[in-house]
Amino acid sequence: MPSDRLNVLLVHCHDLGRYLGCYDVDVETPRIDELATQGALFENHYVTAPQCSPSRGSLATGRHPHGNGLMGLAHGNWELNDDERILPQYLAEAGYETHLFGLQHVTGNTDRLEYDHVHSEGNLYPGVSPEVHQANRARNVADVVSTFLEKRAFEAPFFASVGFFECHRVEEENGRFGFDSDFYEVDDPDEVRPLPYLPDRRGVRRDLAEMRGMVYAIDDAVGVILDALAEGGLEEGTLVVFTTEHGIAFPRAKGSPYDAGLEAALIVRWPGVADDGSRYDELLSNVDVLPTMLECIGLEVPDELHGRSFLPLLTGGGYDEREQVFAEMTWHDMYNPFRAIRTRRYKYVRSFWHLPKVYLTKDIFASEAGREVREADGVPPRPYEELYDLEECPREDDNVVYEPRYRDVRADLAERLKDWMEATDDPLLDGPVPPGDYEEIQSWPHESE
């Protein structure tokens, strides 16, 4: 049961979604699959934003991006609110020794995170040196973490955040964004199962075949860390959480309000509590992870958090299942504000700016998959409202928002979404949200000056 001496190990990576064998994908991930059989796997875990920093900020704070201030990328001058408390701070106050390994993309100022020890660091954004990218590759991060565990270079209890660079696309010399096929193993594109929400074309398959090399690297790294825990006698006393921040870097996934963009893996292993390979299909949001961790180690969950602990789900303590999860985007590489609500059966999306139907982040736009989707689908205008019946159309390509038989569903979900925005003081209710560097731009000299 909850113990204030439980070590906490959080492993996270980029752009992975649920592209894992244990989530029924045709990719071999034996070590992560093994972790799932030794712990608990969550089949309906969704993130608050289909983009890196805002989603990671929610994981770190238990609050939605517009609540904690991180409404865009950390390298776009977006930061958490000054008074926002984050996971390492909570645990440090509880007597934990806190460690950062590898990548984080919550802030451009690592000091803001207040880790006791930063073993290797780097934010994934333009201008970061190749050396930093190299240090944050999974195999290198795992080596540092395993040495730390084997040498017991800590005073228990410890909290360790372990971040991998993979599966983020990288810019190549020809301007294309791929998956660094010179560094990773590449599968045969003809042997790759196509994605159900994208056309089955050669470029999409090739990108998938390349990405799988990064998936294998993540799996190997997780195995190295788990072996070090076991060999160091730390397995029984360590809560292990594996997750990622949003869907894979493909069209209609990363950067989109559809399930392929909002889905995320979540596996929890806690010997004696979550250790039998159970699979849960309850709706979860990644704002729920922090309060769950706090409750696991015996801490009170602050009232201001938007998430709630799912520990009772694991212990059989009378869990009150969520009726819905919420998601959002405000700024990425352009202004793209939407808010979304997802229930078990329906997805309702409200856009606040006129953009193409198929919005592509910069890295996806300049990829083979992005090129082929643009050629196949074009860029018809995106409606301001979208409603999908996920039972009848799981691919979310049949917008039924104006169909008479869904009139009541549309009204109900629109009202719920508005209530949530009001309850959480969403700035979109007051009009367009300026960019993160707005104050800096305003201070620039104007021509008239």
Image: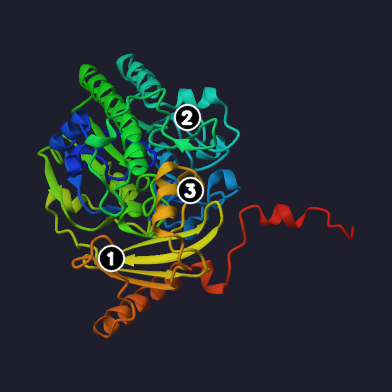
Viewer-nearest of labels 1 and 3? 3
Q: CA distance from mark 1 to mark 3?
A: 31 Å
Q: Quadrant of the C terminus?
A: bottom right
Helix, strand or loop under label 2: loop
Which residue lies at the image location 34% right of the left edge and 67% below the top edge?
341
Q: Nearer the viewer, residue 392 or 228?
A: 392
Q: Residue at x 56, y 56 (%)?
A: 334
In front: 290, or 278? Answer: 278
Residue density around tag 1, few if under 14, some if 14–19, many if 20 or more, within 10 Å: some
Q: Which-is-in-front pick, marks 2 and 1?
A: 1
Q: Nearer the viewer, residue 209 or 221?
A: 209
Say which quadrant the N terminus sits in: top left
**Which residue position is annotated with label 2?**
116
Query: Label 1: which residue?
Result: 324
* Horizontal and vertical percent position of residue 240: 26, 35
Label 2 sits on what residue type? Answer: Asp
Between marks 2 and 3, how big is the CA–CA gap?
39 Å
Estimate the spatial distance between the alpha carbons at disc 2 and disc 1, rounded to whole Å. 36 Å
Checking the image for residue 365, the label placed there is 3
Q: Are marks 2 and 3 in contact (CB under 8 Å)?
A: no
Q: Position of residue 222 (x, y in %)?
A: 28, 28
Q: Which mark is first along the chain, 3 or 1? A: 1
Image spot of residue 204 (x, y percent): 35, 43
- Check disc 2: other Cα within 10 Å, few if <14, some if 14-19, many if 20+: some
